[in-house]
Image (spheres, rainbow, N blue to C red):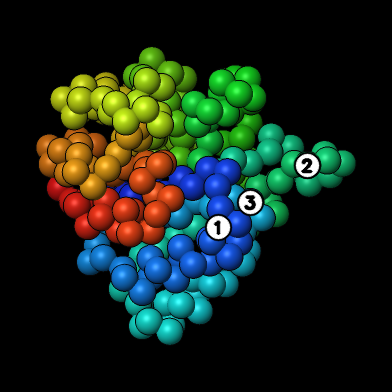
Amino acid sequence: MNERLPLTVANLKANKTWPEMSRWISDFIANRPQFEGTIVVCPSFPFLAAASEEIRNLIDVYRAFDLNLKLGCQDISIFEQGAYTGEVAASQLFKVCQFAIIGHSERRQNFKEDDSMLARKVERARQSSLEPIFCVQGPETSIPPQVTIVAYEPVFAIGTGLPDTPENAFTVSREIKKRGDYKVIYGGSVTSDNVHSFLQEGTVDGVLVGGKSLDPFSFIGVVKNASY
């Protein structure tokens, strides 16, 4: 991943059936935007293996060899493989996806994930060669070792249509980067209309897109405008 090019992440959360996800992938690749950065699509767990195969096939069909499209998962277990009913171990995702969202505010709030648990998840991800996208709510949020990509996602902006100001996102990004050699992306009500304002200054290195990633053409609009 080129550190100087933007990272655009689609977090589809607990949405879509497989036929809908398959159509999303097809529409996105068929209408792919010109984009030199890295695009990461994060569907639900049941679709990751099929999505990986679908992406490989469609990139060949549409000759989209210039498209740097990767897969990510939305969470991983704190446990390795074993008797943990309902869990998905990081090692089970090896070679299926390349990235893992860890510490999203919805997981922190709804599943009471704390700093200790999230640090274990980061460690599990690294052990299985997954790149963590570690979510924080501000510059004071604890960041575990081995994290290189940090997603700043203020809770008030998640799914509300009320994004943070670009100026504050720049300030938070600079504060986070004082703590380590991080790539910092912004998440929270990102749209095709506001994405460039978050990236134009060069302090924010990409975006984490939620609601506007559900429609492939809306996400294409975000990607088209996601440049410095």
Element at label 2: loop
Q: CA distance from mark 2 to mark 3?
A: 11 Å
Circle nearer the viewer, 1 or 2: 2
Among the two numbered marks 1 and 3 on one chain, the one whose residue lies closer to the N terminus: 3
Q: CA distance from mark 1 to mark 3?
A: 10 Å
Q: Residue at x 53, y 43 (%)?
A: 13
Q: Residue at x 45, y 40 (%)?
A: 133
Residue 18 sits in which quadrant? bottom right
Picture disc at residue 97: 1
- Give the amino acid at mark 1: Cys
At mark 3, the secondary structure is helix
Query: In this view, which residue lies farthest toward the left?
Result: 201
- Of the two numbered discs 1 and 2 on the same chain, state the one appearing first in sequence: 2
Give how far apart the Cα atoms at labels 1 and 2 are: 19 Å
Left or right: 159, with 43 as reference point: left
Residue 174 visible at all? no
Say which quarter of the image contains residue 65: bottom left
As drawn, 190 above or below 112:
below
Residue 215 screen position, x and y as percent: 40, 54
In front of the other: 116 or 70? 70
Task: Tell me the residue at 75%/41% (across/down).
Answer: 87
Instruction: Decide: few, some or many residues near mark 1? Use Cα within 10 Å; few <14, some 14-19, many ≥20.
Output: many
- Expressed as whole percent of the image width and height from the top left, the position of residue 157 reads 35, 26
- The residue pinned by badge 3 equals 45
Which kind of residue does numbered mark 3 sit on? Phe
Nearest-to-viewer mark from 1 and 3 = 3
Residue 57 placed where, x, y %?
50, 79
Q: Which mark is residue 86?
A: 2
Residue 85 appears in which quarter of the rendering?
top right
Dot 2 amino acid type: Gly
Query: Is label 1 in contact with label 3 (beta carbons under 8 Å)?
Result: no
Tell me: 130 left or right of 207.
right
